[in-house]
Amino acid sequence: MNKTQIHIVGGGLAGCEAAWQCLRAGHDVRLYEMRPKKMTPAHATGDLAELVCSNSLKSMLPDTAPGLLKSEMQALDSLILKAAAHTAVPAGQALAVERTVFSLFILESLESFPGFKKVDAEVTELPPVGDNEAWIVASGPLTSQPLVDQLQGLCPDSRRLHFYDAIAPILETESIDESIVFRASRYDDSGDGDYWNVPLNKDEYEAFVDAVIAAEKMPLHDFEDVAYFESCLPIEVMIERGRETLRFGPMKPMGLVDPRTGHRPWAAVQLRMENKEGTMVSMVGFQTKMKWPEQKRVFSLLPGLKDVEFFRFGSVHRNSYLKSPDVLDRDLSFRSAPRIFLAGQITGVEGYTESAAIGLLAGRAASAKVQGQRFLMPPAGTIIGALYQYITEGGLGDFQPMNANLGLLPSLPKQRGMGKPQRKALQCARSREIFAAYANQLSGSSQNYQHGGVWNAQAGL
Ligand SMILES: Cc1cc2nc3c(=O)[nH]c(=O)nc-3n(C[C@H](O)[C@H](O)[C@H](O)COP(=O)(O)OP(=O)(O)OC[C@H]3O[C@@H](n4cnc5c(N)ncnc54)[C@H](O)[C@@H]3O)c2cc1C
């Protein structure tokens, strides 16, 4: 067999994971990392897979989305999780790591392959790809500008590349009190409707505005001195323009009638379906920089949202990502350049583990392609498969970065006498079964893997 070479841009979580997968498959890998010669505004070192903020890779509990994702990635021989298991520090039910040794473990693991070469350089252009080669771009949320320009050239139009995300919270529909929150579309009195509407009277509106004003917000980084797009202003910025601004913006009550009063409410928050099953809804126009615990506290003050559960919190930050469903093929390569793959946060996932997960899939897919094969992607009933499906097919609303959450999985029908925790446990058990069947399929093919169980901190050692 001719020597095959895979070039990977970005030595972050996704790039390192992809490199490991390619090396294991027998390819030579050149991993290009611009740090420390050229730093990003958030990284502080030249280390591989630097964790730019928290040192936590979230929950290890089996019946949570992060826990499921870990078990699946472990079964797919993830380097990032192997490194995390080796360098874990006590953090209760979360998987937290000692960041310097975590990075060192990753470097040493990659360097244990003779075919690995780390290149300390910024990639400013993507050269033509040779027959036995592939490129994987895993340059992250803070991709350097020359590379952004190159990626722009691979997209059919520039609106496919975003530089900030302005994300509204996503809620679990089941946790909403439907005796208060009502279904209706504006100016439609058919009694049915596509939106859930949270009605507020004048006092409730005033109290909500005060709570947003008083809530703690995330500080802006120097590089995030954002000139906000008018169409996606954070709600707190709107309130700075006047207490009534929300009532004439995302909380306008026009065309709605509260069935409890028979009148138009003073203000209303609209919730829009995020998946076909209607198990996830987003708060329309509610992008915010309030801290996460504050979002939980403040949004729970809204009528009918007292016990609401969040699949994703809102945020506004600098984040380069592509509208992947429009530009990527099913194997994560560009439709316009089938030997160039995209991986990590720049594909439209959010978070350390999620980014590594897409690095893993892109590494597998690129490895298979240079050998003239096709990698079998995981099914949507698994968490890693649900993330993959999200970035290749998109959801119902605008394409916005997504984290791993149970709302991405098919839900189970309500059953009499079965509580929510029990249903979630069953949903996760079903997902584990789907993953086990997938792993079996892989082990029956040339793409051999271990079987998936639950995440086991010891098993990775
Ligand atoms: C300020 C900030 C705080 C965050 N906090 C958290 C958190 O607490 N928890 C969490 O889960 N997620 C957090 N995230 C998101 C997290 O950074 C990402 O999910 C994760 O690091 C993405 O992995 P990645 O491999 O896609 O990108 P990165 O880890 O960013 O890796 C990309 C790499 O590419 C390199 N690079 C960029 N351009 C080039 C180029 N042209 N040539 C060569 N190399 C290049 C960069 O130097 C970088 O090392 C945060 C992000 C930011 C910006």
Image: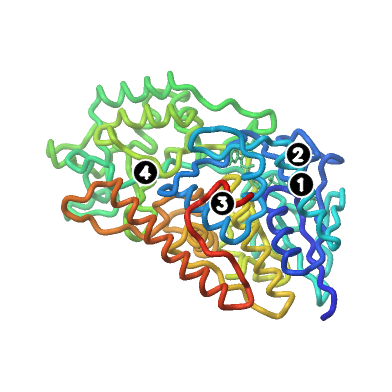
Quadrant of residue 257 within the rendered picture: top left
Between the residue at mark 4 and the residue at mark 2, the CA separation in whole angstroms equals 33 Å
Up the image or down, 414 lies above or below 100; here it is below
The amino acid beneath tag 2 is Thr
Number of the front mark, 1 or 4: 4
* Residue depicted at 46% across the width and 31% down the height: 292
Between the residue at mark 1 and the residue at mark 4, the CA separation in whole angstroms equals 34 Å
Return the mark for residue 349: 3
Q: Can the viewer see residue 4 in this picture? A: yes
Between the residue at mark 4 and the residue at mark 3, the CA separation in whole angstroms equals 18 Å
Residue 430 point in image, percent of width and height = 37, 61
Between the residue at mark 1 and the residue at mark 2, the CA separation in whole angstroms equals 8 Å
- Horizontally, is 318 left or right of 32 in the view? left
Return the mark for residue 40: 2
Colour convention of the picture:
rainbow
The amino acid beneath tag 4 is Leu
- Horizontally, is 252 left or right of 304 in the view? right
The earlier-in-sequence mark between 4 and 3 is 4
Residue under circle 4?
A: 171
Residue 237 point in image, percent of width and height = 49, 28
> Is the residue indicated by label 2 positioned so its CB lies within 8 Å of ligand 1?
yes
The earlier-in-sequence mark between 1 and 4 is 1
Residue under circle 1?
A: 144
